[in-house]
Amino acid sequence: MSPEHLPYAGIRVVEFTHMVMGPTCGMVLADLGAEVIKVEPLAGDNTRRLLGAGAGFFPLFNRNKKSIALDLHTPRGLEVALRLVASADIVSENFRDGTMSRLGLDYETLSKRDERLIYVSHKGFLPGPYDHRTALDEVVQMMGGLAYMTGREGDPLRAGSSVNDIMGGMFGAIGAMAALARRTVTGKGQEVQSALYENNVFLVAQHMMQFAMTGEPAAPMPSRISAWAVYDVFTVKGGGQVFLAVVSDSQWATFCGVFGFNALQADPRLVTNNDRVRARDWLMPLLRSRLAAFSAAELSKAFEENGLPFAPITRPEELFDDPHLLATGGLAPMQLPDGRATRVPLMPITLQGERPGVRSDPPLLGEHTDALLAEAGYSPAQVEALRHDKVIL
């Protein structure tokens, strides 16, 4: 899809963000065609330098963006930021409460300059008793029930991805989209807020509603009472593992037919799914014993050929070679900041049958500073003076 046909082509976003939550919001808008200008300190977003589990943050969440590096704590650096904001439809930020106010870059101040401005704040908590706390993804997973649900009894465990940061940024983008739609009616912008804790509560709402419906607390996922009898990981021949599911009565009949389990299909204790759920204590050990004679590949082939749900147990690095992702364009070529080539997963949507792609690689620090300043009306001499005085990189 050509850039001009993307839905947010012509929309300008100026983001004062770092880490994951705020950059995710900008990435979503950028992937959908917006011009997203990332304002970074002279040292750059800290995620440019993270190791270990944070090493992938910057290249993933900052594609399709422009970078300008400036010192916001100087009057001239702040002037540059205000000129950029004056040209923006959306401002996005995810700094601690009070930071943007001290700089004069808060919604109350900026909206007086431009009533059409949409301002997205990504926080740990929405306004309330907790909003003074410092939040991280893992913090809200622990206090919001997700770590309890993910781990075993007495062993809370964070989810294996930055789920609240990423989804919090996505909800920030959804809020910005809603505000853009509303602006076409009223002519006015508004402030949008998204928060880690409230996002986490949204994620565990199904378990809250389970309690509301049944009066029984939801058990952690490893010890939950499954809604389906066969819905688990099986360790099979050669130590391989595969996830297998049989979630309906018709699938149970197919499953028994494929593997010749005629006696099980005829067993009056196993007629319905709920019957089989009640029989899990003896049924699952029996199935594990019988299926252990097959390899994971053999079971996968049998399940796929008969329309039964299954999944190989896959590590993230193996997805680079996933045939479905490769065949459907789900991985796009991209250059890392150090110059190496890679592929990156795209947003899981299509527009007119196409995945919104990577139009530009994650930017080098300050890569677009000169061009953006020229566009904002700064002369080459003024740009050089700003650089000489260490206002810009």
Image: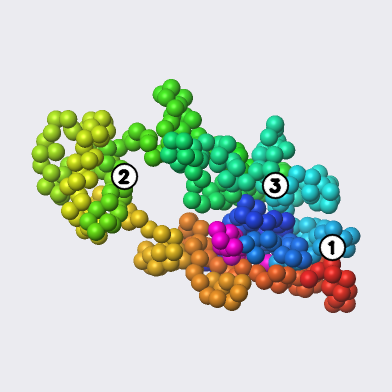
Specify whether 216 is left or right of 195. Answer: left
Q: What kind of residue is marked 2? A: Asp
Residue under label 1, please give it: 77
- Label 2 vs label 3, nearer the camera: 2
Residue placed most toward the observer, 131 or 93? 131
Along the polypeptide, which appears first: circle 2 or circle 1? 1
Label 2 Cα crowd, 10 Å radius (few <14 / some 14-19 / many 20+): some
Residue 247 location in percent, x, y?
28, 41
Number of the label disc, if any, that sits on residue 232: 2
Q: What kind of residue is marked 1? A: Gly
Give SS at disc 1: helix
Q: CA distance from mark 2 to mark 3?
A: 40 Å
- Residue 366 lies in quadrant: bottom right
Q: Where 286 sits versus 275, above or below?
A: below
Colour approach in the figure: rainbow
The outermost residue toward the front is 154
Specify whether 90 is left or right of 32. Answer: right
Q: Are marks 1 and 3 in contact (CB under 8 Å)?
A: no
- Residue 275 lies in quadrant: top left
Residue drawn at 62 percent across, 46 percent down: 136
Q: What kind of residue is marked 3? A: Ser
Label 1 Cα crowd, 10 Å radius (few <14 / some 14-19 / many 20+): some
Give SS at disc 3: strand
Residue under label 3, please give it: 121
Q: Are marks 2 and 1 in contact (CB under 8 Å)?
A: no
Specify whether 244 is left or right of 169. Answer: left
Q: CA distance from mark 2 to mark 1?
A: 56 Å
Query: Bounds of the magenta span?
Result: 51-66
Residue 309 visible to an observer of this rendering: no
